[in-house]
């Protein structure tokens, strides 16, 4: 039986870069297809991928987690401390061909464990309206929708959970 494993990974590793490129491609294409009837232009994608700074996902105040399925890189989740009690969940992603095999909950639970290890008592996150699978996952895992906690122009739903 194939199983999931989750372990910390440097945010700038080749494995992280490949998974983040897949993440950005999917969420960007979804957004543009919904709002403009087109896929992401290669220059737009490259600008987003290379312009993202995820150095906050490094110890001692953050971590990038990579999930592997059968030993192969399969998904990511980032955790960063915002203050002494609050961690933020970022970039939860499972490769499309592996969805429905339990990777999302495994990643989120590992991120929650990581947030606790960092000293957080609460996890927050934001997501978009069109990412319905993500919203359903967070609700299933005990996250409650809250008012906005940031002014991210793409955020349309905000969630929190006591850890």
Image (cartoon, grey):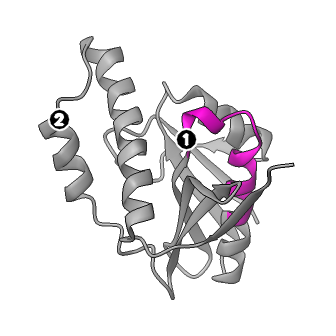
Q: Secondary structure at mark 1?
A: loop
Residue 150 visible? The answer is no
Taking the magenta stretch, the answer to whether it contains residue 116 is: no
Kindly identify the residue that appears in the image at 43 percent across and 44 percent down: 23
- Tell me where the magenta segment starts and ends, as one range: 94-110
Disc 2 target residue: 42
Instruction: Residue at 26% x, 52% y: name it.
Output: 49
> Residue 151, image x and y in percent?
35, 48
Queried whether the magenta region covers residue 99, the answer comes back as yes
The reply to whether residue 100 is visible in this rendering is: yes
Which residue sits furthest right?
Answer: 1
- Residue drawn 53% across and 74% down? 63
Q: Residues within 10 Å of mark 1 (few under 14, many from 20)?
A: some
Across and down, in percent, residue 161 comes to 71, 56
Q: How many marks?
A: 2
Which quadrant of the view contains residue 43? top left
Residue bearing mark 1? 95
In the figure, residue 71 lies in which quadrant?
A: bottom right
Find the residue positioned furthest to the top.
37
- Asked if the residues shown at circle 2 and circle 1 are in contact, with their CB atoms under 8 angstroms apart, the answer is no
Q: Residue furthest bottom?
A: 60
For the point 34% across and 47% down, which residue is it? 152
What predominant SS class does the magenta segment belong to?
helix
Q: Secondary structure at mark 2?
A: helix
Measured as percent of width and height from the top left, residue 115 is found at 65, 73
């Amino acid at each position: 039986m194939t199983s999931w494993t989750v372990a910390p990974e440097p945010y700038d590793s080749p494995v992280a870069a490949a998974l983040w490129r897949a993440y950005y491609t999917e969420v960007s294409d979804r957004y543009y297809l919904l709002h403009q009837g087109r896929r992401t232009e290669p220059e737009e994608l490259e600008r987003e991928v290379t312009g993202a700074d995820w150095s906050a996902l490094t110890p001692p105040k953050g971590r990038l987690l990579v999930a592997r399925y059968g030993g192969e890189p399969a998904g990511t989740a980032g955790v960063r401390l915002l203050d002494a009690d609050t961690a933020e969940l970022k970039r939860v992603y499972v490769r499309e061909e592996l969805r429905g095999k339990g990777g999302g909950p495994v990643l989120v639970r590992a991120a929650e464990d990581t947030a606790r290890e960092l000293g957080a008592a609460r996890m927050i996150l934001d997501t978009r309206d069109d990412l319905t699978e993500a919203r359903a996952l967070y609700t299933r895992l005990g996250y409650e929708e809250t008012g906005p906690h940031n002014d991210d122009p793409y955020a349309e739903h905000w969630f929190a959970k006591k850890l």
